[in-house]
Image: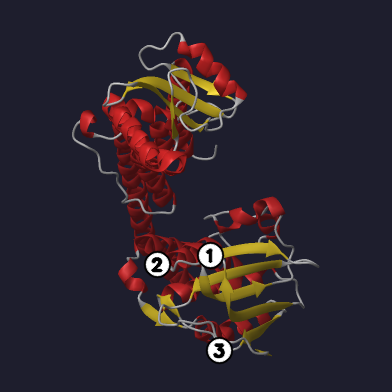
Amino acid sequence: MKTFFLQLFLSFWLAALGILIGSTLLFPGSNPGPADNFRAAGQASSRRIVDDSLREFAEDGCTGLTQSEGSFIVLRTDGTPLCNEKLSAEEQRLIKRTLGDLHGWGLNARAGESWIQMHPVTSTDGRHWLLFGRTKYVHGLGIPPLPRNALPASIIVTFVLALILTRPVRRLSAAFRAFAAGDLSVRLPVARNWWSSVGGADIRELMLDFNHMAERVNELIEAQKVLVRDISHELRSPLARLRLALEMTREESEQPLPSLDRMEAEAERVNELIGQMLTLSLMESTPQSALKETVSAEEIVRSLLPNMEFEAAGRGCNILFHSRGPVPQTSGNRELLRRALENVIRNAIRFTEIGTTVEVEVYAEQHAVLIGPAVHVIVSDRGPGVPEQNLAMIFRAFYRTDSARRDATGGFGVGLSIAERAVALHGGRISAHNRNGGGLSVEILLPVAVRENAVPELVGATS
């Protein structure tokens, strides 16, 4: 069984069903069915039925009696029908066997496919008769009418009961999913006392443990963010003084010193790393209210192209841009999206082979993951690619493949992490896969702005 709710529901319902069937088998009584209307009718009603039948017989003979008798037959005390109604051989045998021992409610037995009952009745005029009733026999376990009608009710009651009892588990599951998705503020409402909590003390303790865990993790992550932000800011000042000292040393030196150039390059790398760390910190602290701009991913890519083409030329490669049809806008923050797209394109330029082309494609299309129209930005290179088992890891901060470390491409493993967090803040997805023939393709999905109620019809590609 896939869910706790289904297990609980089936357990309760099967237990209730077992009680019903067990009570029927242990206490079967007479055949439970419509024949019990004899007892329900009572002696007074039986006398009325006999009196009415005798009156009809006196007025219209057997014709009138046949029309009025219904499921009852009036028998003489010797067991013969008043109007020669047809009785099966089995019924006649049971009637004759019972005639000598009629007391209480008399005959109550099965005869073939019928259940028959018979008991003595004294009519108003003082004569003695036998009232005979025949109903269809109920096969199988013969569940009584009330429990049979109660089966749907038992399903409903069990469903509601299971729904109530599993509600805390569903809340806990939803809280875990939200927490895993990055909402560190999620907390569970906990009852003051265990007896007022659905699920009792165990569920209450579990909710308290979750809230304590969430609070502690939130404190640790916030402390880490503050530490990274403070360290990054504190490093900027001595780094600026170091670069100033390098410039002064270079001016005072009478001849070029290659070591100074190397020191300046390394200082620039550290400065770049600090900038990326501050960007990561900015991503974590960006409120949702800052993501309400209406921006165009296509415009951002076009604005990046001149600088990206210049960097690509320095690497001995080029960039080819495609835009399919009018691309709708998306809601978000222009600066965050610009950094994300810039990092992805720059990463492709860094790893593509010399003389190859980095392809950037933008288009709009329905997407099942985002459940609606989405803007697609795909950046593809012709580099070494990434081992399949490491594709999901390249979006982690400071992760670098072995080939990246070996080839000293100059990155810190932070660019794609910044892109992943920026895209996630916009409710989008980013993924990577290896290309046929070599290379890596990174795809960014961004949900279309709410005011865009349809995906434009795709047209031919333009470059």
**Looking at the rendering, in which quadrant would you find the N terminus?**
top right
Q: How is the image coloured?
A: secondary structure
Q: Which mark is residue 429?
A: 1
Q: Which mark is residue 240?
A: 2
Residue 45's image quarter? top left
- Chain-order first, disc 1 or disc 3: 3
Left or right placement of residue 68 versus residue 301 in this view: left
User: Which residue of the protein is positioned furthest toward the left in this rendering?
Assistant: 192
- Chain-order first, disc 2 or disc 3: 2
Front position in the image: 309 or 292? 292
Q: Real-space Cα distance between discs 2 and 3?
A: 45 Å
> Which residue sits at x=33%, y=56%?
230
**Looking at the rendering, in which quadrant would you find the C terminus?**
bottom right
Q: Which mark is residue 326?
A: 3
User: What kind of element bears circle 2?
Assistant: helix
Instruction: Report the amino acid beneath label 2.
Output: Ala
> Which residue sits at x=46%, y=43%?
63
Instruction: Report the amino acid beneath label 1.
Output: Arg
